[in-house]
Image (cartoon, rainbow, N blue to C red):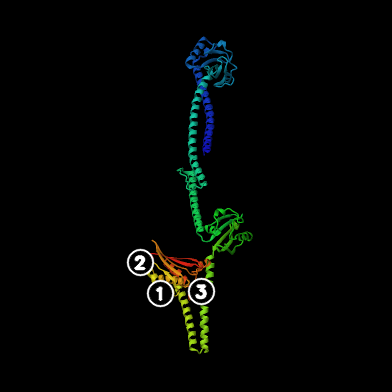
């Protein structure tokens, strides 16, 4: 803007200077002509005045009186007067002796009067006598009859006019110089007023290009520049709003992607990975700095995604398939590969979305196992019921004792089916929260002693050693006493069932400021490590025959887990095969 300001000022100043130069020449020319015209008129007037004072008789051959009279006009008037007869002879002169002067018949001003019979003749030329440039004006002298008897010529040196003109030129030059300076200052101020808001607008546009969308033009200039400033401010405000909206959308998209449980990966047309979310990082087991910017053919692909990506690039179609993470994690993903497009539906790359369906697969397996287990659990007693009832109905059993034993078997198997159905209904009620908790204060130590007293016969039959918490160290928590009783009864009964004769069962209760930890440890047969994660599933058994022989339904631990969770607690399991098992129930003191 400094260059624009300088150019405007310089252009305006040069234009003003040009106009002043033309004005200079015009004024000086007019002034010089005016001065000469005024001098000429003045000379003619003086010549007329002197002509009236000259007598016609004095023109006849000239007289000393005429010379003396002419000399009288030299000092007061400051002009030169010359009397010339019609033949060009000088009769008298106010500055020189007439006899020393040559004939003036060839003078232009004299010829104009004599030959052309004009009222005045005028000429400007160099005077040999005065040795300067002079202005001459000649006027005829008439007698009483109106005949020209002579000529009176007045002259005036032009150096006086030139001196006057020089003074005038100097004054005019100073005046025009002042005008030029004023015009230059005015042009500078005008240029500044124009370029200053333009500089502000330029600075704002530069800040806008530098992504500083809060910049505004602060100017009160009106007119087109004011409208331009307003347009730039509107543009800046619109850009700021759009960038704010884009930033919010970007943050929303980033938040959505980062909180998605599904993994997302974006690959451009060149095959380079542009974006992955945190879920995809977790699925791949790598940090994004080892993935972003790399070619999809080069990064550590633990899920086998390369083939699907390459196929989408080749066929430009969506692909869906299942991929597994490996033998250790045993993760299963539902992978979706698809092209993404830019303007004009031109393919820009590939997008991959992974859904972790490990739990779904596990639930499907559990459902399948549940159906198989229920079918298996019901098949045996139903087969027994059918077989023994058919035998009795056939009438082949005549022995009363045998018939009674068959009926007893039918009764026992019916009881077993009834327990199974009741356990399933009870578990369903717990899961669906049909039966709310009856919260009250529960004394855990007294409850534990009561349960072991109830199971004392089974304990004594196997000669087991039971270690219980001291009655004096009572622990109170908020909970449903019946359900807590069911939890501890199941755990202690399982410990008794799967602990060999002469074994030991240790029941401990530890209180912390926030919760209570109830542990039931035994020295029984233990659980293999690979079976521990599935122990709490319905009907899941480490040994298929072991639970059936013990009379269990396979639902006890599933019921325990849901009862613990209904109390906002959790249950933990540690076990070593052949050494024993420890179940730890962690319950909050307050519900």
Front in this rendered view, residue 311 or 304: 304
Please indicate, yes or no, whether residue 294 appears anywhere in the rendered image. Answer: yes
* Of callouts 2 and 3, the N-terminal one: 2
State left or right for residue 588 relative to residue 244: left
Mark 2–mark 3 Cα distance, whole angstroms, equals 38 Å
Front in this rendered view, residue 55 or 433: 433
Please indicate, yes or no, whether residue 342 appears anywhere in the rendered image. Answer: no
Mark 1–mark 2 Cα distance, whole angstroms, equals 20 Å
The residue that disc 3 covers is 546
Relative height, residue 477 to residue 224 (above, below): below
Q: Residues within 10 Å of mark 3 (few under 14, many from 20)?
A: few
Relative height, residue 435 to residue 72 (above, below): below
Number of the label disc, if any, that sits on residue 192: none
> Residue 162: x, y in percent?
52, 21
Number of the label disc, if any, that sits on residue 454: 1
Front in this rendered view, residue 459 or 133: 459
The residue that disc 2 covers is 472
Q: Residues within 10 Å of mark 1 (few under 14, many from 20)?
A: few
Query: Which residue is at the far right?
Result: 314
> Residue 101: x, y in percent?
57, 12
Relative height, residue 500 to residue 342 (above, below): below
Q: Secondary structure at mark 2?
A: loop
> Residue 314: x, y in percent?
64, 59
Relative height, residue 170 to residue 533 (above, below): above
The image quarter in which residue 440 lies: bottom left
Q: Secondary structure at mark 3?
A: helix
Q: Are marks 2 and 3 in contact (CB under 8 Å)?
A: no
Q: Residue at x 38, y 70 (%)?
A: 447
Mark 3–mark 1 Cα distance, whole angstroms, equals 23 Å
Front in this rendered view, residue 451 or 167: 451
- Please identify, in this view, whether the residue under mark 2 or under mark 3 is nearer the observer: 2
Q: Quadrant of the C terminus?
A: bottom left
């Amino acid at each position: 803007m400094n260059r624009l300001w300088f150019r405007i000022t310089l252009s305006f100043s040069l234009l003003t200077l040009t106009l002043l130069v033309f004005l200079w020449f015009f004024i000086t020319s007019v002034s010089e002509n005016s001065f000469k015209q005024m001098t000429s008129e003045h000379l003619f007037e003086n010549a007329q005045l002197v002509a009236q004072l000259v007598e016609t008789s004095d023109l006849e051959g000239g007289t000393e009186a005429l010379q003396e009279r002419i000399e009288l006009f030299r000092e007061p008037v400051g002009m030169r007067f010359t009397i010339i007869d019609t033949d060009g002879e000088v009769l008298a002169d106010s500055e020189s002796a007439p006899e020393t002067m040559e004939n003036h018949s060839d003078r232009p001003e004299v010829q104009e009067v004599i030959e052309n019979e004009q009222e005045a003749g005028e000429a400007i030329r160099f005077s040999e006598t005065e040795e300067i440039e002079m202005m001459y004006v000649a006027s005829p002298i008439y007698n009483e009859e109106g005949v020209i008897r002579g000529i009176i010529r007045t002259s005036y040196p032009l150096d006086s006019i030139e001196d006057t003109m020089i003074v005038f030129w100097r004054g005019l030059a100073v005046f025009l110089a002042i005008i030029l300076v004023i015009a230059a200052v005015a042009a500078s101020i005008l240029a500044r007023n124009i370029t200053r808001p333009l500089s502000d607008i330029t600075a704002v546009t530069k800040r806008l290009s530098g992504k500083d969308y809060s910049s505004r033009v602060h100017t009160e200039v009106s007119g087109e520049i004011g409208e331009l400033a307003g347009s730039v401010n509107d543009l800046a405000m619109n850009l700021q709003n759009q960038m704010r909206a884009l930033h919010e959308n970007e943050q929303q998209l980033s938040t959505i992607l980062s909180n998605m449980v599904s993994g997302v990966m974006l690959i451009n047309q060149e095959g380079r990975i542009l974006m992955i979310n945190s879920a995809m990082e977790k699925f791949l087991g790598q940090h994004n700095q080892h993935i972003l910017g790399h070619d999809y053919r080069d990064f550590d692909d633990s899920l086998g995604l390369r083939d699907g990506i390459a196929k989408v690039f080749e066929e430009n179609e969506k692909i869906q398939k299942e991929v597994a993470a490996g033998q250790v994690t045993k993760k299963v993903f539902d992978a979706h590969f698809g092209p993404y497009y830019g303007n004009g539906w031109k393919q820009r790359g590939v997008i991959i979305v992974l859904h972790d369906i490990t739990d779904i697969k596990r639930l499907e397996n559990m459902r399948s196992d549940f159906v198989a287990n229920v079918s298996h659990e019901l098949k045996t007693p139903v087969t027994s019921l059918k077989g023994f009832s058919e035998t009795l109905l056939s009438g082949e059993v005549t022995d009363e004792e045998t018939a009674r034993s068959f009926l007893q078997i039918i009764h026992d198997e019916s009881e077993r089916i009834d327990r199974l159905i009741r356990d399933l209904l009870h578990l369903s009620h717990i899961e669906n929260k049909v039966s709310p908790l009856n919260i009250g204060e529960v004394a855990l130590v007294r409850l534990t002693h009561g349960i072991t007293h109830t199971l004392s016969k089974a304990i004594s039959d196997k000669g087991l050693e039971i270690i219980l918490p001291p009655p004096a160290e009572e622990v109170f928590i908020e909970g449903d006493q019946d359900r807590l009783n069911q939890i501890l009864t199941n755990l202690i009964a399982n410990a008794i069932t799967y602990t060999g004769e002469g074994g030991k069962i240790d029941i401990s209760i530890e209180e912390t400021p926030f919760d209570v930890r109830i542990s039931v440890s035994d020295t029984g047969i233990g659980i293999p490590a690979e079976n521990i994660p599935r122990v709490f599933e319905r009907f899941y058994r480490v040994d298929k025959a072991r639970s059936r022989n013990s009379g269990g339904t396979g639902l006890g631990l599933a019921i325990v887990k849901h009862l613990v969770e209904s109390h906002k607690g959790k249950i933990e399991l540690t076990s070593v095969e052949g050494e024993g098992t420890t179940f730890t129930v962690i319950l909050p003191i307050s519900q």
